[in-house]
Every structure is written in structure tokens, then in C-alpha cells.
Image (cartoon, rainbow, N blue to C red):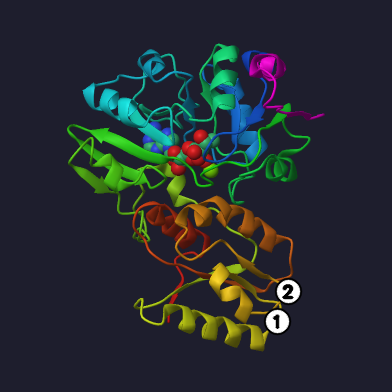
Amino acid sequence: MKTELIKIDFAKPLSGQLSLPAKILAEGGLVAFPTETVYGLGGNALDASAAGKIYAAKGRPSDNPLIVHIARPGDAEKYADTNPLYEALAKAFMPGPLTVVLPKKEIIPFSVTGGLQTVGIRCPGDPVARELIRLAGVPVAAPSANVSGRPSPTAASHVADDLNGRIDCIIDGGEAEVGLESTIVKIDGDRLILLRPGAITPEMLRTVCENVVLDNGILGKLPEGVSPQAPGMKYRHYAPRAKVYLVRAENEEQADRKAIAFFRARLAENPQVGILCYDEHLPFLSGENVYSYGKKEDDLAHSHLLFDCLRRFDETEAPAIYAVIGKTEGIGLALYNRMLKASAYTVIYI
Ligand code: TXA
Ligand code: MG
């Protein structure tokens, strides 16, 4: 299959540039598109066969439900049973990086929800994504546009690396701003269960709903036989080829000095090891595979760059990757969650 590549020119109106991919979606084809979190691999959410094509292109298990993307927060009621708490979340955070799990309406096929009675609804903040969905005239089911098990794509080039020749079209709208997938919450009576942390943090959610609980799978490995509430969280995710070790200081005092000493010791053993550190560490480290993901205090930069760095390590011969991890508040919780998964929960305390 030839994959059409469309590069968005932001100086021109979007609608003309998006008419071809919108037509592809409406006719049952697959289009990768930018969102503010990560790139999505979209198909018509009302068409069971489009969902089948998505699973096949990604090599993804079909019990892992797809998020349904809508152009306007109010469109949710066509596809799910909404309620006042949904309305409040929509008013506060949509369009934006939040997915809300609600009881599904019949119109959404079970192949989209992996057999579940619920559906994840998301209205993306990215204007290209919203205009595409609006023009397609259908809701768009979209997982992240990576091959299953690879880090989520934050640039069109990542999508092309994974899916070129396997899908109809890729829209290049530049780098994803957030860089980590959306926050997922499930509405459970008057409380919110946080299934996946993201840029809409627990602190932000608490401004709308006092009762926010974290699913056990977020910071810990679930016991054998226990399924997480978001089925996708059970798969080994976001994983580069080399084994990843997280490096975390036991206390803030001298954290940088200890991290630098730890990294230098690993590099002395093998100059090929992968190091993911902060800008402040770079002057003290030399090796082929040493990358920074931003200044120490800049957690937005860390989120923005994490998946790109993990993909870059895949192009090296690095036998192992040591990645520094800092605060776990705010968006730091989402970062820590993704890094725990990438490392299969291997944390080295220094
Ligand atoms: O930011 C995002 O959410 C991106 C962009 C493309 O919008 N999409 C994304 O999709 O990350 P995906 O398929 O890679 O991850 C969706 C996650 C999975 O862990 C899945 O199990 C969970 O959402 N999920 C979807 N529907 C669900 C439902 N009805 N109940 C519980 N979890 C659900
Ligand atoms: Mg994914």
C-alpha cells in the first residue's frame, strides 16, 4: 500500500489540506494524524471493519479498546451516556488531553471497545485533529500510531518509521506538544478513577471532582492474575529494545552529584551504555549514547522529549539504558508511570 504524506502548511486554511484524509476516513481507510498528546492512527469509529484494520496495522491485541475522538465535547452524547460530571470535566478540560470513560451507546461497535460496555471519549486540543474529525463527519477511533510495543509517536517521522506502507495516509502537523498520551478517567458515581495519568493532573481533576482515586496499576505492578481497568495498561508498553533502569535519588540532597557519579561509573564500565539525564549533567558525561531530556526543573520538556529519546536509543547499540527520574507530582506522575513501564518497574535508588 502506498502511504500518502500530507505536510500541513499552517499559513494556509486547514480544510483544503484535510479534505483528502477526511474522505479516506469516511470511506473506511486509516489516517495517522497529529494530536497535542501523541500521533493517533484513526479510523471510522462507527465501522467495525475500520477497527479491524487498525488492530492489524499496529499488530495490537483486539481486546485492547480504542479511544473515540470527537470534534466537539457536546458530540459525546451521540456515542455515550453522558452525565453532569462529564459536562463539568468537558467544560474545564476539553478540548484537551483528557479521555473520559462512559457507558457506550449501541452505535459504537464492540470491536472498537474491545468487547467492553464502556467507551473512552476524547476531544483533542490540536486544531488539525478537530478539523479532520469535523470534515470526516464521523467519530474517529484512534490508538497511538505506533507498532504495538514501540514508544508512542510524537512526530510524523516516528509514525512513518513504524507504519509506512501499512496505512493510507499520514498527516504531518509538527511535533506533539505534550508528548505523553492523554489522562484517562472513568466516571464511577460521584468519583473519578484515574486509569492513566497525563497532562491533566490529579490536582487539576480535583478542582472539578473532590474524589479522585488512582488505579493500582499506575505506580505499582499489578499482582499476577489481576487486570488493570484500562486493558491497555497490562501490556509491556513504551519499551525500547535495550533494558531500561530508572535512576532515582533517595533524597534531593546531592541528587545531581550522585546521579553524575552513578552515570560516570556505568560509562566507565561500557562507553556504549545509554544515559538519559538532565542538561545540568551533560558537561560531566561523555559517551556515544548520552542524551538529555531537558533542564532538571522542566518537567514539560521531559514529557515532550521522553518518547523521542527512547526511540533514539533504539537506533543505537546501547546494551542498557539508565534514565534519571525526578519529582513525581503534576505531570511528573505521568512521566514516572510511562518510565516504570518502559523499565518493567526496575528502579535503582542512589
Ligand atoms: O492521547 C491519547 O489518548 C492518544 C491519542 C492518539 O489520542 N491515544 C492513545 O490510545 O493513547 P491508545 O490506544 O494507545 O491507548 C488507549 C488506552 C488503552 O490503555 C486502553 O486500554 C484504554 O485507553 N481504554 C480505551 N477505552 C477504554 C475503556 N472503555 N475502558 C478502559 N480503558 C479504556
Ligand atoms: Mg498506545
* Sequence-wise first label, 1 or 2: 1
Q: Is residue 129 visible?
A: yes
Is 68 left, or right, of 318 in this rendering? left
- Residue nearest the observer in this picture, 10 or 30: 10
Residue at x-position 40% and y-position 57%: 332
Q: Which residue is mark 2?
A: 288
Question: Would residue 50 be found to the left or right of residue 202 on screen?
Answer: right
Residue at x-position 63% and y-position 42%: 175
Labels 1 & 2 near each other (Cβ < 8 A): yes
228 lies above or below 349: above
Query: Residue 212 appears at what percent x and percent y?
Result: 23, 44
Residue 21 belongs to the span the image colors magenta: yes
Furthest toward the right, the residue is 2
Q: Which residues are magenta?
A: 1-22
State the image quarter where residue 106 is shown: top left
Which label is found at residue 271? 1
